[in-house]
Amino acid sequence: MDIEQLWGILHKERSMATLQELPDGFCEDVGRYIGQLAAEKCAVDERRAELVEDEIRNARMKVEDIVRRRIGKIVKLASSGSRTLPRGMLAAEEEIFTGVKRHVDEGKERLLALMLDQRGSAASAAQSELKRSVQENVPKAQHSVRKAESGSNEEEKEQPQHPGKREEQPKSSWNLFRSTKPTPARERGEELHIVRILDDLPPFMGIDGRIYKLKREDVILLPKTNAEILCKRGVAERFEGEIAPGGGEHDEK
């Protein structure tokens, strides 16, 4: 082994993407070569010793460069998931390959386990929170339903019963909505108008405090103010008949 051979091996290692097959006994030859140079340095004069020292330094640099490049290739192969030993490796390099591959595989498993466990924990926590929320809200909802049913029953009991009296049906084929309770607007003496609804409307509160849910073709008594607003918007049209304060319905002419 000499400096020229080391240079040739380094040049080939740089130019190849894979590992080159080193000469048999490469490690021993390199060690023997460096040892011979060290012995020669001690046996020659000072001037020659400086030249030998430069050769030793150059030889070490080339050997280190060869080793560094080969280890880089080995680590890349081991981390890529290769299951077989690449060709051209020395015995010591095979140990490096096996060790790196083992650590990479173990690290990969730990990372996957950590990520999957976190996702599983998050999903489990979300399910637990949903279950707890349902358990808390169901009794509240049941209580609200019972309360609403109770209030409805009480209202039915308060409704006056008139067995012998039948409500007069309107002559028109349209639905005429009337409240079973006294109309606040009428009590205040406010004028009421009969209007026919031309389009489905969202629920709204009249100036009499009532909530109106009106649909197309409904005919209903409305406070004058609300009736005029709906007619101006084009969603209702007024009947010719009116209801005066304290008066009754006028038939459609």
Image (spheres, rainbow, N blue to C red):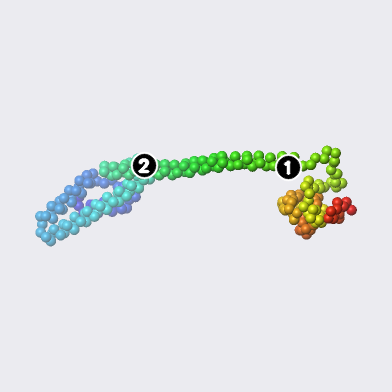
Q: Residues within 10 Å of mark 2 (few under 14, many from 20)?
A: few
Q: Position of residue 138 (x, y in %)?
A: 59, 40
The span from disc 2 to disc 1 (Cα, nearest Å) is 73 Å
Residue annotated with mark 2: 106
Label whose residue precedes the other's in the sequence (2 or 1): 2
For image coordinates 78% across by 49% down, the residue present is 182
Q: Do the CB atoms of the residues marked 2 and 1 lie less than 8 Å apart?
A: no
Looking at this view, is 90 or 203 the one in front? 203
Q: Position of residue 74 (x, y in %)?
A: 32, 46
For image coordinates 58% across by 42% down, the residue present is 137
Quarter residue 94 falls in: top left
Quarter residue 116 falls in: top left
- Please, which residue is most extreme toward the top here? 163
Quarter residue 134 falls in: top right
Picture layout, residue 206 above or below residue 107: below
Q: Is 243 on the left or on the right of 20, as rendered? A: right
Task: Tell how many labels.
Answer: 2
Q: Position of residue 104 (x, y in %)?
A: 36, 44
Mark 1: secondary structure: helix
Residue annotated with mark 1: 155
Amino acid type, mark 2: Glu
Q: Is 116 on the left or on the right of 253, as rendered? A: left
Amino acid type, mark 1: Glu
Q: Residues within 10 Å of mark 1 (few under 14, many from 20)?
A: few
Q: Nearer the viewer, mark 2 or mark 1?
A: 1
